[in-house]
Structure formats: C-alpha cells, structure tokens
Image: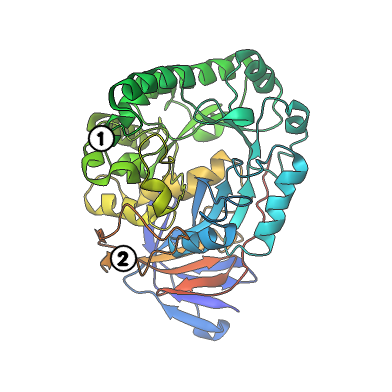
C-alpha cells in the first residue's frame, strides 16, 4: 500500500518543516514541501498539527525469550514497542539459555522473524568459556557483543581482567557493557543484610549499588578500550562521576567510546523509592537527583550519545518480594518516547535533540543501514505524535505481558497516534495491526 502523509511537521536532522511524505515499497519514496498529489497514494492520512519523527531505535531491551516467557515474549514486547513509537530494537542475551553460541543467537532471530512487528537485532552474549564463539560474530548481521562486567551471575558475569583484555583486543565488532563492580556491590549488600536481613528498604538500593561501583567498572572498560583500540559502548550511565570518561569534542562517527542514558535514569531519582519501592529497582540503580541532572546535561552536551529504555519486565508478583529476592528491572519500551516528550514540554530538551538521541544517533552509532532518518530512499520507519493530546497510563492500555508499569496513572501531555515499520502501518490510534513488518537489521561495517 502506498501511503501519503499530508502536512505533518517533520522533525529530522536538527530542523522542523511541514512537508508531504509518500511511503512506497517499504521506503520513504518522496518528501515534498510543495505537496504531493493524493492520486499517487492508496491511503491518505491528514497530519496537520501532528509531528512526524523517525521511528525510535532502542539499543537496549530485554524481551525474555527464550526461557523466561512468563515475564515477556518477543511478540508481546515488540507489540508494546511499536505502540510506543519504537520501530527498531536490539535485545540482550541474558535469556534462558543465554545466547552464548552462534546457534542459540540465531534461534532468537528466527523467533523474531515470525512474530515481530518491529525491526530487530540481538546481541551476542559473553561468557567465561565462549571466546571462540564470540570471534565468529558477524559484524554486518549482529548489532554487537554484550559483556556483563557486573550485575549478572554464573557464566555471564565476566569481570576477569585477563579474559576481558583478550576480548577487547580481538572483538570483531562493537562491545556493549554493563558496568558495575560486583565485589564492591556484594560487600555493600552484606552490610545491609547484617542490619536488615533480607527485607532491606529499597531506598538503600543506590547505596548498595553506588557511584563508586559504577565508576570503577566503567573506568576499567574505558581503559581497556583505549589500550586495545576497541569500539566500546557503555550502557545506562547513572552517575556524575562516570561522565568524565566521555568526550564531546569529536563527532559521533569518529568516537571509539560512546555512552547511553536510559529514560528512567532521566525521570526518577532516589526520592522515588519511598513511593515506588522495588518497582523501580534496577541495575545500575536510579541514584540522586544531582546524578540524574548531571546525566541529563551530558545528554544535551553530547558526552552521552543516545537515549534508550533498558526495558526489563518482571511479573508483579516477582517485584513484590523482599528486596534481596525482588528482581531488578522495569518495563518501559511502550512509554519511553512519551517520557521524553514530557521533558520537551517542560523545556528540558528540544524535540530536535530528542530525535537526534533516540533516532539518528543510534543509527549512526551502530552503523545501521538506511534507518533512523527521514530521507528519501530510507526505510519508512516513522511515528506520528500529537503533542497536545493527553494520555493517561492505565492497566487497560499497558501492553507489556507483565501487565504493570511504574508509570501507571501518569498523565502524559502527548500521544502516539501512528507507527509505520518498513512502510506498513502497525499501529494507529490505539489499534494494533497483526503485521509482521519487522526486518533483521543490517549494518554498514
């Protein structure tokens, strides 16, 4: 179907302008400020007063399949993603079994091929004994290699500096890291268990997983990358101290070390544990308001390169357990764009900067082929938003399989109206279409 979007305000590459956009054969066929004839389209959508953004690219999600499908599935969470304007996701390897072989990794691609309305890629997982498998990773077909340098268990926790040095020296593609010093975290945890037992008040989570633990591990990763010339991407930065590790004096395309901020670390702070408790328990922890504000400032001045969600669902029952048993992570992929649009309304970030950090920069950072921009000849991955239509998060409109959100009862001042993936309408005005529009990402590396 050829779809014509009439008169949207296009937000793209640092500017906003009103123009018609024709979608044809999965691509953005034509962009014309002078207008495009409705006769060229099978369907015309009047978009006056609406804003057209490139579809969001979320470089960090946990969709829990295989093995943890009581929490989420690739199908359920990719549906929530497109309802949130996310047209492309990159999913993490800590499933059950973890994606530690090329064969297990490929199985995840095959699942997505048969169920995902969004475009997809999956990180290859790093373990203590899969070095040869890592070296088989195809940089043109896989988004990257994920290393848990903290906050994992067993085979997937890799904090041995000799093994890390070997991987950093020889990795065939980008390395993405979760950085926390587990030795420090475990020592802190034991202190609070001695005081409170298993039922530690959640407000101590950012004290247990503190800034020192984050900085120690992030610095180790950055030092290894500098030593070996590695292409390193450090995920979910949460502290002011870590920001000294990143540079904003060179263009993104020339950076060897990049960083990500997540929407919950830009939204919540440690004061929110008193009302939300384990609902917002995540690793690395949500920290102080001053840390939050410093990370936000680093997003604006380009020390931090992209904004993502780290969508990590667990069941409500799991999250209600005592602190030591309640799993870390919160579901966010459906609401990340609205959270950041609220920051636009508050004057904290411009709409153009939001698009840069959630659409353009992820495409450039990961070298994704022909996505992330509104350009003729690029994939028609697009989202239409109404910046003046209120939206209340309720149990009825939460699409995560886990069925809850820490944002329940939040009123957003913007609404996502339409999402297109490869030129196909997968979401419109609250209605989801059973369209398997998603494609496997390709990388220009």
Image spot of residue 319 (x, y percent): 39, 47
Instruction: Identify residue for label 2.
Output: 394
Q: Quadrant of residue 225?
A: top right
Q: Horizontal and vertical percent for residue 412?
A: 27, 60
Q: Quadrant of the N terminus?
A: bottom right
Whether 367 is drawn above or below 417: the answer is above
The answer to whether residue 209 is left or right of residue 145 is left
Tell me which residue sits at (74%, 26%) in the image. Answer: 131
Identify the residue at image location x=46%, y=24%: 180
Quadrant of the rendering where the C terminus is positioned: top right
Q: Residues within 10 Å of mark 1 (few under 14, many from 20)?
A: many
| Residue 248 or residue 88, whichever sits in front | 88
Q: Residue at x 28, y 22 (%)?
A: 195
171 over 122 or under it: above or below: above
Identify the residue under disc 1.
270
Horizontal and vertical percent position of residue 166: 69, 18
Query: At 53% across and 15% down in the image, what residue appears?
Result: 223
Confirm whether residue 241 shows in the render: no
Q: Residue furthest bottom?
A: 39
Q: Secondary structure at mark 1?
A: helix
Residue 35, placed above or below residue 321: below
Q: How is the image coloured?
A: rainbow
**Left or right of residue 49, residue 217 in this image:** right
Task: Give the alpha-carbon distance from disc 2 to disc 1, as whole Å.
Answer: 24 Å
Asked whether, in this view, residue 203 is left or right of residue 119, the answer is left
In this orientation, does residue 42 appear? Answer: yes
Q: Nearer the viewer, residue 419 or 25?
A: 419
- Observer-nearest residue: 113 or 29? 113
Q: Position of residue 410 (x, y in %)?
A: 25, 58
- Are dots 2 and 1 in contact, CB under 8 Å? no
Q: Mark 2 or mark 1: which comes first in sequence?
A: 1
């Amino acid at each position: 179907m050829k779809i014509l979007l009439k008169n949207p305000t296009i937000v793209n590459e640092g500017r906003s302008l009103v123009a018609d956009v024709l979608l044809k054969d999965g691509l953005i066929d034509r962009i014309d400020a002078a207008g495009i004839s409705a006769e060229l389209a099978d369907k015309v959508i009047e978009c006056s007063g609406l804003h057209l953004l490139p579809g969001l690219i979320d470089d960090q999600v946990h969709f829990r399949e295989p093995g943890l499908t009581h929490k989420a599935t690739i199908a359920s969470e990719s549906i929530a993603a497109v309802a949130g304007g996310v047209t492309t996701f990159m999913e993490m390897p800590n499933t059950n079994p973890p994606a530690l072989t090329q064969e297990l990794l490929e199985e995840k691609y095959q699942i997505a091929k048969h169920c995902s309305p969004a475009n997809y890629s999956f990180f290859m997982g790093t373990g203590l004994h899969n070095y040869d498998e890592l070296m088989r990773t195809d940089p043109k077909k896989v988004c990257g290699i994920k290393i848990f340098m903290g906050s994992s268990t067993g085979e997937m926790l890799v904090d041995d500096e000799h093994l890390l040095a070997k991987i950093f020296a020889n990795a065939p593609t980008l390395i993405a890291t979760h950085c926390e010093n587990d030795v420090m975290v475990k020592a802190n945890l034991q202190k609070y268990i001695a005081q409170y037992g298993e039922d530690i008040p959640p407000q101590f989570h950012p004290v247990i997983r503190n800034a020192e633990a984050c900085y120690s591990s992030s610095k180790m990763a950055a030092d290894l990358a500098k030593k070996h010339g590695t292409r390193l991407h450090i995920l979910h930065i949460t502290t002011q101290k870590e920001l000294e590790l990143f540079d904003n004096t060179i263009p993104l395309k020339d950076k060897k070390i990049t960083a990500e901020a997540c929407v919950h670390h830009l939204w919540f702070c440690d004061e929110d544990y008193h009302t939300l408790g384990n609902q917002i328990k995540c690793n690395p922890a949500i920290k102080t308001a001053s840390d939050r504000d410093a990370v936000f400032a680093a997003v604006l001045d380009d020390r931090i390169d992209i904004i993502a969600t780290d969508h990590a669902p667990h069941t409500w029952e799991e999250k209600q357990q005592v602190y030591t048993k309640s799993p870390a992570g919160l579901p966010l992929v459906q609401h990340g764009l609205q959270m950041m649009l609220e920051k636009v309304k508050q004057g904290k970030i411009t709409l153009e900067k939001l698009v840069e950090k959630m659409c353009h920069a992820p495409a450039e950072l990961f070298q994704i082929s022909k996505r992330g921009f509104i350009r003729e000849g690029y994939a028609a991955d697009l989202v239409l938003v109404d910046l003046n239509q209120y939206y209340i998060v309720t149990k009825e409109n939460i699409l995560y399989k886990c069925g809850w959100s820490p944002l329940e009862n939040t009123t957003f001042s913007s609404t996502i109206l339409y999402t297109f993936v490869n030129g196909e309408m997968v979401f419109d005005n609250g209605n989801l279409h059973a369209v398997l529009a998603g494609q496997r990402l390709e990388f220009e590396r």
